[in-house]
Image (cartoon, coloured by chain):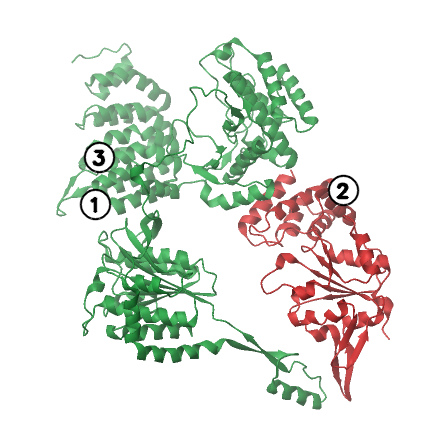
Chain colours: A green, B red
Amino acid sequence: MTETEYQHPLMAAYWKQLDTSFPQVEEVFEDCMAEALSVLTREGLDAYLEAGRVIGKLGRGVEPMLAFLEEWPSTAKAVGEAALPAVMALIWRTQKSPNGRAIAPFLQTLAPVGRRLQSAEQLQHYLDITLDLMERTTGSIHGHHTTFPSPGLPDFLAQAPNLLNQLTLAGLKNWVEYGIRNYGNHPERQKDYFSLQSADSRAVLQRERHGTLLVDVEHKLDLYLRGLWQDGDQLVPYSTAFDEIRKPIPYYDRLGIRLPDVFDDWISPLPPGGGGVGGEGERISGIDRYRAVLAHIVGHRRWSEAQIADNWSPFQRMAVEFFEDCRIETLLIREYPGLRRLFLALHPKPIEGACNPETTSCLRHRMAMLSRALLDPDHGYSDAALNDFAARFHAVMEAGESSTEEIAALALSYVAKTRRQSDQFARVHFDDTVVEYRDDNRQLWKFIESGDEEEAFDEKRKIEPGEEIQGLPPRHYPEWDYASQTYRPDWASVYAALHPSGQAADIDKLLAKHGALAKRLKKMLDLLKPQDKVRIRYQEEGSELDLDVAIRSLIDFKGGATPDPRINMSHRTDGRDIAVMLLLDLSESLNEKAAGSDQTILELSQEAVSLLAWAIDKLGDPFAIAGFHSNTRHDVRYLHIKGYSERWNDDVKARLAAMQAGYSTRMGAAMRHAAHYLGARSADKKLMLILTDGMPSDVDTHDDRLLIEDARQAVKELDQQGIFTYCISLDPKADEYVSDIFGRQYTVIDHVERLPERLPQLFMALTK
Amino acid sequence: MTDKDQYKVEQEPFYQQQKNEVALYEAAYRNRLPVMVKGPTGCGKSRFVEYMAWKLNKPLITVACNEDMTASDLVGRYLLEANGTRWLDGPLTVAARIGAICYLDEIVEARQDTTVVIHPLTDHRRTLPLDKKGELIHAHPDFQLVISYNPGYQTLMKDLKQSTKQRFTAFDFDYPDAALEAQIVAKETGMDEVVAAKLVKIGGVARNLKGHGLDEGISTRLLVYAAVLIKDGVAPRDACRMALVRPITDDADIRDTLDHAIDATFA
């Protein structure tokens, strides 16, 4: 290795201070120092070189050192050079753990992270999050010592700048927290999560994002379209989080209006040259940005006509698009003058002369300036052609709505008039020329010949013969994670299907067997029925004299006071309006024999449910029956036995007769799905009866509390939807957990063999 | 017995004819046909009836119906007095005796049995039996019955029976078109027409949302309120929020949308 000779004695001293012999470092050293000298103070420079020296001696190769030397000056510029000790502390911690490999990615992304965070405190928070992630995901065997590196850490560090672009630090913390909690013990999944590969990683990211999410304001935007524009269409979000290089632009087609999934508040840049008015540019909220996009699209739908594109050059087409956009916006502003403020705040204000036509293609810049001028009466541009065309544009618009064709002619003559040789240059001036709220204008063009650039966006997807869809697609429900007090988004997949059928006669036989019981029940049912008369008192006119009031009135009258004339009463019928959902746990444990009986719990449940169904049918309340079991969160099965619109007939009985038990009990998901049906009923009272023989559990869940807490959360959700849940538990040990889930709304039936008798009685007592 | 003049409409109410409803009403009145006026709230139903009473120079007795109203509230009742009872005519009976136009506002609000008592008055018989009093009143030749109701509120429980509906000729009212409505607002309040047109525009936005979270759009009456507030010096945006948006909805999304419409309209 050769000792480099630096001409400048100072540079040589620095090189000596760095004390390294990596040739790769040597290559960039001068550049790095030049940047460092311009940013760092004298002390900062010493610390920089010292830190570089230390990192070089870590024994991790050249990568970390290179990354540090290149990244630190710009990081220091963003967060201040005083943050160095904190960064070094983290590097030391990492070095001493098995995670040494993560030092390089950490340093490589430090500068973009620093630029995003902009302060030493914020950076400290980021470092804390990183450290936390490292310590909690670094594996150990038998609890002895930390021996395995954290699988997700390098991926996390690589993603950090991207993440911080979309999340606040608090959001990042939540996102990391979720990953640690759910994938702490699963190296491969953890990697997927922290590299943003897995679906729930993206879902949680989406939840924590800053800005206005489309899903949150969709209803408002629907109302906006309908109310202000008498238009309406499907609003389809596209994701802005994962396309880094080519940001999608709003557009619309047959299937709906495509909008970005999130809009941050927009702060328009300060007008150049100070301006002095207010300290900050105008702030446009995310929802208003959505409204601007929608208004623009509505404008196209109302007033634009597709033009044949083949005969025009790309430049000409671009000019036509700019002119047409301005035309419809002028019309929109005519409709709602307040839109001018909104459009102008979002529209860039290109600076005249910012683009040098000698070296750069200025067409975009010219068009953006013109577009600004057409909308903004106080544009202040002095260009003669621009002002001339602005005047011509306004003259055309003065006459009425004009048309796409007419405005296109104007656009073409503008292009012809202002054309320059440099428009063909490869270097294009892009600054301040993108109008954020405009769509991509794909509807403005029709092509007679399909060219190369045509992409088949909306080609119909054909379903291969082999992959025909079996049954309904699953519905996804969230699950409550009590440890973090958050929902896991779209966690459980519920497949709904019709229960297989058996012999209806079996159920009739069961009912015959309980003939005596049925007779007793019938008496109770009859008592339940006529309770629906309500007396209304204090009526001037009514069907009967209310004696109490009449006598009081008479006394008043005899005493010389003004008597109350409302001495009658009448009756009003008050019908039962209860919708019932009976949800049966069909898990494996039902196959066990009931204590002190030679029947299985399943058979007893079958009898009980048959009797109850018969009783409810007699009462005339609308009711549905469904069973559920689960085999991990990916396969929760929800089996329809009776729907609300079905009668209590042989079809239903046949399904009930075929009841079978298997798998586990993921109760929360099944309850949420059942509530989806019950919630849609229009009854006054909604009752969900859950018949179960054990506590919620599933094979993929090791924490017993988790599904219990989830079920408890489901009960709360149902309560908010106005659904009364009631649990009938056949588990003698249920007292330990069932009140945690259902509060006081449960009964434990100890003598399972008495279930057929108890169940209908319970129902009647509940609904009396 | 009863002072007929107290029911007269003294001053000409402002009413802007929308189509030919004035002539049609006059024809109905000439033949003493009962009239039903339908339409959303605040679109000028009551104003129209008032105007016609003034134009025809007939007394007008208005009864606002509510759900506790009984037949005797319309027809009359015996009052207890220290030395016996005294019969008191109800508004319908008074109208039939003196020959007034009896206007039952929002008739569907009244109990179903109440509406039946008007039946004999509305067909060829033109009589009103007072069964409690044992009297049969033959309606005065000038008597006419007008009812109004708002089909927008229609629920299963509150609808007129066919037998009632088919005793009336009917006018279907709606909010006037934008230009006319702006004129009305301007004339009613003395507001300039440009601002009035903006108010009407906001009204239109809300009317588009009817059925999508709003039961009723913004009525002409509310537009007039807003104009009155603006006339009094209230800033237009505040006046609109106060008079147009806050009264009609509690739904945050709709409120936001309408607020935005106000901002977009009053640039």
- Residue A275 lies, with reference to residue A742, above or below; the image says above
- In the rendered view of the protein, which quadrant contains the N terminus of chain A? top left
Residue under label 3, please give it: A92
The mark lying in front, picked from 3 and 1, is 1
The mark lying in front, picked from 2 and 3, is 2
- Image quarter for residue A629? bottom left
| Percent of width and height locating residue A697 | 25, 57
- Residue A185 circle label: 1
- Image quarter for residue B92? bottom right
- In the rendered view of the protein, which quadrant contains the C terminus of chain A? bottom left
- Image quarter for residue B146? bottom right
Amino acid type, label 2: Asp
Gap in angstroms between the C-alphas marked 2 and 3: 75 Å
In this picture, residue A296 sits left or right of residue A585: right
Q: Is residue B118 visible?
A: no
Amino acid type, label 3: Trp
Instruction: Report in which chain the residue with disc 2 lies.
Output: B
